[in-house]
């Protein structure tokens, strides 16, 4: 066995730290590339109408729930008395909470009692970030957590 010299020790330590640095950079890049972290482009502008928008949304008295069954997303929007709500407009993004790779834009159809849309899922936690417009023009935004089990 060859003796341990300063040169061998230096290259061994440099190699070990090089591997650690490379892995850290790869993980940091992967984290930033898969989740942008932005909810709105300008949080100050979005905050200006927050209280008024929130009060108008709460005044609607809607309850929202969602689940996935047989590769269909079922979205239920009900009034305070339990009657189903037919909105003027409904958009949403259905995807994972941790990355945007699996994001889908569901094409909702109102069945008279709920909204359904075909989706592709895998087991785990999913989020539906929905935006609806009431018949009177009131905006309604909510993030609905959906647990998919197979």
Image (spheres, rainbow, N blue to C red):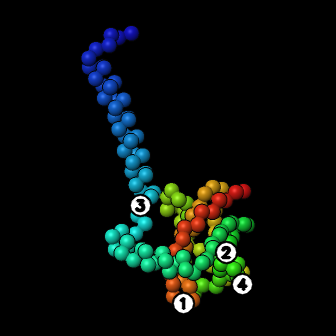
Residue at the image position 46 percent from the left and 78 percent from the top: 53
- Where is residue 11? Give x, y as percent: 30, 25
What is the CA distance from the residue labelled 2 to the residue labelled 3?
Answer: 29 Å
Would you call the spot at circle 4 few (<14 residues within 10 Å), some (14-19), or many (20 or more)? few
Quadrant into which the N terminus falls: top left
Q: Secondary structure at mark 4?
A: loop
Q: Secondary structure at mark 3?
A: loop
Q: Which mark is residue 136?
A: 1
Q: Are marks 4 and 1 in contact (CB under 8 Å)?
A: no
What is the CA distance from the residue labelled 4 to the residue labelled 1?
Answer: 19 Å
Would you call the spot at circle 1 few (<14 residues within 10 Å), some (14-19), or many (20 or more)? few
Q: Nearer the viewer, residue 140 or 28?
A: 140
Which residue does the numbered mark 4 point to in the structure image? 112
**97 left or right of 21?**
right
Q: Is residue 64 above or below residue 1?
A: below
Q: Nearer the viewer, residue 111 or 6?
A: 111
Which one is in front in this view, the residue at disc 4 or the one at disc 1?
Answer: 1
**150 left or right of 7?**
right
Q: Earlier in the sequence, mark 3 or mark 4?
A: 3
């Amino acid at each position: 066995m060859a003796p341990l010299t300063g040169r061998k020790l230096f290259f061994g330590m440099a190699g070990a730290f090089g591997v650690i640095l490379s892995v850290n950079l790869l993980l940091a890049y992967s984290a930033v590339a898969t989740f942008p972290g932005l909810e709105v482009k300008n949080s100050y502008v979005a905050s200006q109408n927050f209280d008024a928008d929130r009060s108008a949304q709460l005044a609607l008295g809607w309850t929202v729930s969602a689940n996935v069954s047989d590769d269909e997303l079922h979205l239920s929007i009900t009034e305070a008395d339990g009657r189903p709500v037919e909105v003027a407009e409904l958009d949403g993004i259905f995807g994972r909470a941790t990355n945007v790779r699996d994001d889908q834009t569901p094409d909702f159809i109102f069945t008279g009692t709920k909204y359904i849309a075909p989706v592709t899922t895998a087991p785990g936690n999913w989020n539906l970030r929905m935006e609806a417009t009431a018949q009177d023009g009131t905006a309604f935004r909510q993030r609905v957590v959906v647990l998919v089990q197979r």
